[in-house]
Image (cartoon, rainbow, N blue to C red):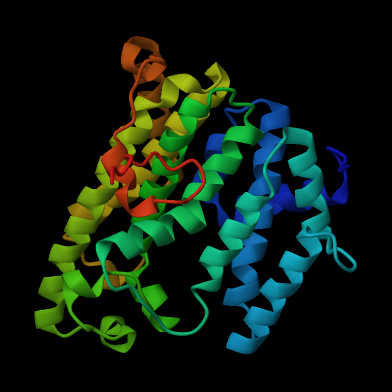
Amino acid sequence: MSSQNGPVARDSRETLRRHGKSFHFASYFLGRQHSLRASRLYAFCRHVDDLVDTASGARAASIALDALEAELAGHGQRSPQADDFLALAAETGMDTGLARQLIAGVRSDIGPVAISARDDLIRYAYSVAGVVGLMMCDVLGVQADRARPFAIDLGIAMQLTNIARDVGEDARLGRRYLPEAWIGPVTPEQLVSPDPGLQSQLRHQTRVLLELADIYYRSARDGMGYLPVRARFAILIAGRLYREIGQKIARQGYATWNGRVRVSSGEKLLIALRAAGAFLVRRDIHATHATHMSSLHDALTGLPFAHTRPHHG
């Protein structure tokens, strides 16, 4: 089991600080144990991403993910990342099958990516971020299973925001996440330097994407009351920080190809102060009677903890 002050712990905190600035800021509002566990989970998820993003090619990325899956299943010598994740899962009662779902989502990033339809986009967001929300439930000691669909929604909302922010960066990696059903058969190459006609279309569809993200943010907010109090405040801040990225994109006219939008340290402090005010006066943030809107998970049939409507034959 990993020490709270050992090299893996220090490395995970540094990974969070360098690559997950919004989460790093929000982690200050967690207790020590939850903050460390959250940073360890983030470091593992980042490791999974890097196995694809830094690979020399599609075959190398696939082999690396295969090896990680084998390590998590107990085959062969484990890497420090797999070893620490399994220790974290044991400490928190986490289902390691969620890590396999994450790996499957990241695996879909190998090679050219061209999302076809809205449901495909939602399923992708679930696999790479909704499952992280589920794992965070265990990291934060959430007891109520009713919290889990809302946690999925926060992960989906954040991933949709990431996609809106990174249209150009993803295009340079050969990836187009805006569904073809929305934007047509546009290639990633066309998104790197969009012509004026495509720019207009991109502005509109990025707005559509962020409006979709807002639906999932609102659902996630409805489930905040299921979180332990201190974690509730930290996750409220994290959600508001991420939502601010989308709001800044909107204020800049949805022109995401001009460069990545960032939230400054001063803006983060202001958001945290506003979140503190809402935390103190808004009863809905602390309510534990919210009913999840199952239609938000219509695309997620068969996936762990998805709240889908029963089908009657």
Looking at the image, residue 114 sits to the left or right of residue 25; the answer is left
Residue 179 location, quadrant: bottom left
Residue farthest to the front? 313
Pick whichever, 254 or 52, lies toward us: 52
Residue 118 picture location, percent across and down: 26, 62
Residue for point 44% across, 53% down: 126
Q: Quadrant of residue 137?
A: top right
In the image shown, does 116 or 24 lie closer to the viewer?
116
Q: Which residue is depicted at the point 62% across and 56% down?
A: 45
Q: Is residue 261 visible?
A: no
Q: In the image, residue 210 lies at what x, y percent?
A: 24, 53
Q: Is residue 60 visible?
A: yes
- Residue at 17% across, 64% down: 205
Residue drawn at (49%, 24%) of the image: 232
Residue 104 position (above or below residue 299): below
- Residue 200 horizontal/vertical position (percent): 10, 72
The image quarter containing residue 75 is bottom right
- Which corner quadrant holds the N terminus? top right
Q: Residue 48, percent across and down?
A: 64, 64
Q: Is residue 261 left or right of residue 67?
A: left
Question: So how many labels did they put on this image?
Answer: 0
Q: Nearer the viewer, residue 163 or 181?
A: 181
